[in-house]
Image (cartoon, rainbow, N blue to C red):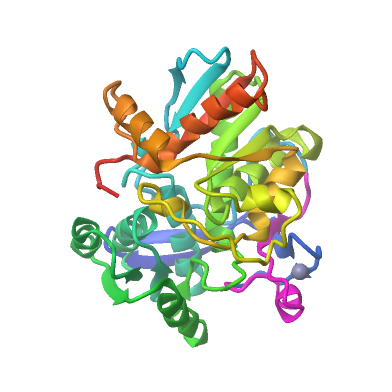
Amino acid sequence: MRYARWAYRTTVGTVTVAQNPALRSLVCLRCGTHHPVADLPSGCPACLANGTPANVACAYDTDGTSGGVRLPYTVPFTLGEGRTPLLRADLDLDVDLRLKWEGANPTGSHKDRFSALVVARALHAGYRAVAAASSGNAGVSLAAYCGRAGLGCEIAVTDGIPDRVATLMRDLGAHVVTFPDPAARWRHLAAHTRSPTVLPVTNFRLPPVGSSAFGIEGYKSLATEILTDLAGERPDWVVVPASRGDLAWGMYLGFREVCGAGAVPRLCLVEPYPRVSAVLEGADPHGDFPGTTAVMPSLGGNSVALQAVAAVRRSGGRAQVVDDDTVTAETHRLWRTGLPVEPSSAAALVAVADARVSGAIEPGSLVVALATAHGMKGM
Ligand SMILES: [Zn+2]
């Protein structure tokens, strides 16, 4: 099958971006409406008009299980993301526990999978720059990938960002703009939707919809990597730290494509205070979910995106709340065992332990926990 190709001059020479000819539309996860392929940073226009924002996902010509996952673009400027190790972890929990070590990605987090795809989208659609709201891993990752591709990169941060993280973004070529609070930076990001040259790729809506559908496709490859490393055995549970659920939703899409909709491993979302878990117990998903975390800022936020709830419900999964003190202790323990994770990653292992104690994860289960990011950035 031929791919349509566009060639671009970048910092590493001329590269060619090809859109998958099987990519046909973007489909709303709530109402099922198919939209033409375009950037929909506010999600499904019909659901937005109804006051119930919902993200969209790439839809391809045919469903099926070809053994791999389909992606919207080939990624010619890859920094080597993906193919991260699946390590054994022994927590004496009477489960077969594996750790997907995403800190091994080029900038030290799973966000590199997202960045590779949104940069491909930006090049293909003719944007000159990418913009995002991030105070951590996503901003660092996008800065690196945009630099590689010769695109501008603007990262909107809040005042509380650690100096060394902002410095790292700047050193990687990003333009860092600072705002007093998350609402102000979301308003700034939203203004880019009127620009033909700047592509906003992270959420700026409340209620949230999640990040770029093209970037989220990048998380699908986690499913094939995990199944390959398990020699085709399907995990009983996949435990995923979550804020607005980009990673969990992308992994759901990947497993659905490879395993079929009825055989997706159960997803357990990990959160620092009840959000998805409250919705699963009947709370209004558009409500406010107060809570704070001092050690897991990448899992913060007081709202719920529909995609996070959908990933849990459609996989028959659940959500697990973990607390700062236990996560801090587990982070220190993991560092001493050769795994310098950030606390938001250690949260996944705490969730496995808590879910075993409560019986939510059964003895003998095959469990994969996502260690999403390296801790050496100091986030
Ligand atoms: Zn819709």
Find residue 58 and report its horizontal and vertical position in percent: 67, 58
- Residue depicted at 61% across the width and 74% down the height: 42
Find residue 229 and report its horizontal and vertical position in percent: 53, 22
Whether residue 272 is visible: yes
Vertically, is 101 above or below 323?
A: above
Residue 34 image-quadrant placement: bottom right
- Residue depicted at 57% across the width and 73% down the height: 205
Query: For this view, does 36 lie left or right of residue 8?
Result: right
Find residue 306 and report its horizontal and vertical position in percent: 68, 59
Looking at the picture, tell me which residue is in the foreground, 284 or 128: 284
**Is residue 60 inside the magenta stretch?**
yes
Considering every residue shown, the one lying at the far bottom of the view is 194
Vertically, is 319 above or below 300?
A: above
Residue 11 image-quadrant placement: bottom left
Vertically, is 242 above or below 148?
A: above
Q: Give the range drawn in magenta.
A: 41-63
